Image: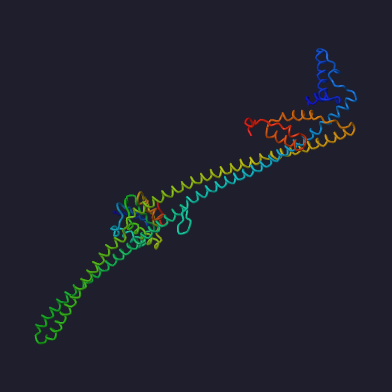
Amino acid sequence: MELRQEITSGAAKFFLKGKFTFSDHELFREIINLIKDGAVSSIVMDFEEVNFIDSAGLGMILIAKEESDKKNCSVILKGAKGQIEKMFKVSKFDTLFTIK
Amino acid sequence: MDALLKEDESLKTTDSGAELKEKNAQSQQDLQEDQGVQSASDCLPDRSDDGNEAMLGSWSGVTPPTISMIDVISDKLTDASKLIEDSTLDLSTKFRDLASGANKQADTVQRVIEKASTLKVDGEDISMLEFSDIFNESLVDAIEKVLHISKLAISMVYSLDDAIEAIKDIEKFNERIQGINKQTNLLSLNATIEAARAGEAGRGFAVVSDEVRHVSKEINDLSMEMSDKIGQVGNSVRSGYKTLQEVATTDMSGSIRAKDTLDALMAALITQTDEFKEILGGAAQDSIETSTIISNMIVGMQFQDKTTQYIDNSVLALSEISSALAQLKKNTESNIGSNNEDQEVQKALIENITSKLQLSEFKQGYNKDLVARGVLCSSLLEDEPEEDDIELF
């Protein structure tokens, strides 16, 4: 997948595009590192242009949650539709994240 | 009663029947002669005291069969009352059975519906809805486990990444060691050359220099081995990546399909449950309506009570009339004297009344009772032609 970020004063927005799978783990590390560094207090992940996600992708989002909980950083999942939306529902992500 | 009066006219005296008939005919003739003018005295019987006494006497002669007939009728009425009472009781019982039958049906419908929506699993009763919930939970559970494993696998990947970073640093150190080693080797070479220049004095120095070159070679060998090992670690990590990729990657599309199927199942179950509730409601309503109708029927049969009382009261009255007549006869007889009870008159009286009866079953029972009371001779019992075909009983 492709990853684009916008960071403004402690709030980070990440725009994901394409298929979100295992091979994107290095790319996703950027987000994890940002959280770990404590550089941001809120993160929005935009899935508007993501058309596929597997368990690896979902696992990565869960790691992001784990790290952000340690740093009191909020995580919002935005714009999920179609298969992505169904996946979030089936995985009960609405109980873990703010879904918009 | 008119017939009775007619007959009484001819019983003014104690004449024989033939003579009486003659007298009756005579007065009839007189009547016919005076067509236009009929004085009352010509038509009415002789109103002399003797005549009155005789009339009373003959009246009292007719009293016994009259009393008997009243008593027989009384009995018949009592039979009728009993018949109504028994029949009503029987009907009531049957209605109650009907009501209970209707209730049982409603219960059966309820039980069928309950059975239709539950399954017995491991000795426990589970409703369809519970089943669906259990399925759903299992699905969510399975998904959570898969995601958990994926998450752990990715974590491991990141740990391996860190390991790779550290190994890269180690590799760098190794290179530096090799670099330093190269220098050391060069220095020792220089030292050996200087030692040779110093001649005899530099011999000890040359030895040391050789040793240094040895050590340097050893370090170099070690360094090479380290490089190898580092390379191996790198390979292991890279193959670890591949394994982890497999562990972390599960296509969840199947789970989505399963969830969709479950949701459809749930919706269908709810619809079915609603439909069942409607049916049940209808059956319950029917049951209530039936019960109400039956209750009304049972109330309606309370007519029986009143009817029986009417009959019982009528019987009482008849009994009193019977007694009064008997008393009257006694008084009449003691004052006037008993009359020769004219069988023919009595027979005529009885026949006249009996001829009015329409139900042959009633008529026969009535006549039998009169014979039993000694009012009729059995010879007077006429064999009625069977007319039962006409009557509906």
Number of marks in picture: 0
**Is the residue B325 above or below the residue B279 in the image?**
above
The quarter of the rendered structure image containing the C terminus of chain B is top right
Residue at horizontal 63 percent and vertical 45 percent from the top: B93
Instruction: Determine which quarter of the picture holds residue B322.
Output: top right
Residue A86, position as x, y percentages in the image: 37, 51
Say if residue A14 shows up in the picture.
yes
Q: Is residue A39 something that shows in the picture?
A: no
Relative vertical location of residue B367 with respect to residue B202 in this rendering, above or below: above
> Could you say which is closer to the camera, residue B133 or residue B42?
B42
Q: Position of residue B179 (x, y in %)?
A: 18, 72
Q: Is residue A7 left or right of residue B195?
A: right
Q: Position of residue B363 (x, y in %)?
A: 70, 33
Q: Could you say which quadrant of the image residue B92 lies in?
A: top right
User: Which residue is more in the foreground, B122 or B353?
Assistant: B353
As drawn, is B72 to the left or to the right of B53?
Answer: left
Left or right of B273 in this view: B367: right
